[in-house]
Image (spheres, rainbow, N blue to C red):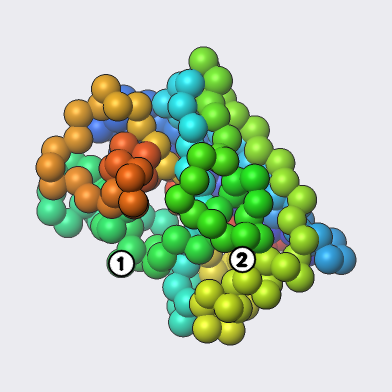
Amino acid sequence: MKIYQANIVPLNEQAIGTAAHGTALFTINGDSLTINIEMFDTPANLQHWEHFHGFPDGKAAEIATSAQDVNHDGFVDLPETGAVSGTTMVPFNDAPHEMDIPNDEYPVADANGYFAYTKVVPLAALDKKFKETFNDSELELDKRVIYIHGVTDDVTLPDTVEGAVGHYSTHVTLPIAVGKIVAL
Ligand SMILES: [Cu+2]
């Protein structure tokens, strides 16, 4: 059995008015990966995209901080996280192993901004899909970071905030918390 965890800390908390935080636990046991994520103080009553991000070339990803707001508009948007965190890799939604990122199958925060997500993923299927997508790369969880996204539409985002994906707006993709995954 192999266990990884992440301490998830707020990002963009000044701009969005809430400091989202939580924990993630990844347990590899035989052919299954069990994912447990618990989040507090996220924007309430809202679905939150969550994924691990990383670099396909084996470089270790690091968490974005306010230093990644390179255009100084007050927000670290999704493209700005890329320099240190790499690209979106695996979603924590209803079927992580399908690696289908833009959809509505992510957890929804309650009225207090709390949600808990648990999923048991078939590891061989995830590994196969990951290798197909990222040029034979290994999952290497300890080189990845977890991101939680999403603010309500009443948060005013300047036009300089980027990161819309298909018909999903920058409100859906704005990062609100991030954590480095480490092996225990
Ligand atoms: Cu993400």
Instruction: Indicate if the residue with disc 1 has its beta carbon within 8 Å of ligand 1.
Output: no
Q: Secondary structure at mark 1?
A: helix
The three-letter amino acid code for the residue at tag 2 is Leu
Q: In screen coordinates, is 66 left or right of 122?
A: left
The disc label shown at residue 141, or none: 2
The answer to whether 178 appears left or right of 71 in the picture is right
Q: Residues within 10 Å of mark 2 (few under 14, many from 20)?
A: many
Q: Residue furthest toward the top?
A: 111
Image quadrant assignment for residue 10: top left
Residue 25 visible in the current orientation? no
Quarter in which the C terminus is drawn: bottom right
In this rendering, does residue 68 appear at all?
Answer: yes
112 w.r.t. 181: above or below: above
The local crowd at label 1, few if under 14, some if 14 to 19, many if 20 or more residues have their Cα within 10 Å, is: some
Percent position of residue 156, x then y? 20, 29
Asked if residue 30 is positioned above or below residue 21 in the image, the reply reads below
Q: Disc 2 beta carbon < 8 A from ligand 1?
A: no
**Residue appearing at x 45%, y 73% in the figure:** 55
The residue positioned 13% from the left and 53% from the top of the image is: 71
Q: State the image quarter where residue 19 is shown.
A: top left
- Give the residue drawn at x 23%, y 43%: 75
CA distance separating discs 1 and 2:
18 Å
Residue 39 picture location, percent across and down:
56, 33
| Residue at image mark 1 | 83
Residue shown at 63% from the left, 71% from the top: 129
Q: Is residue 121 above or below residue 170?
A: below
Q: Earlier in the sequence, mark 1 or mark 2?
A: 1
Q: Is residue 127 left or right of residue 82?
A: right
Q: Amino acid at mark 1?
A: Ala
Q: Position of residue 67 (x, y in %)?
A: 24, 54
Viewer-proximal residue among 14 and 100: 100
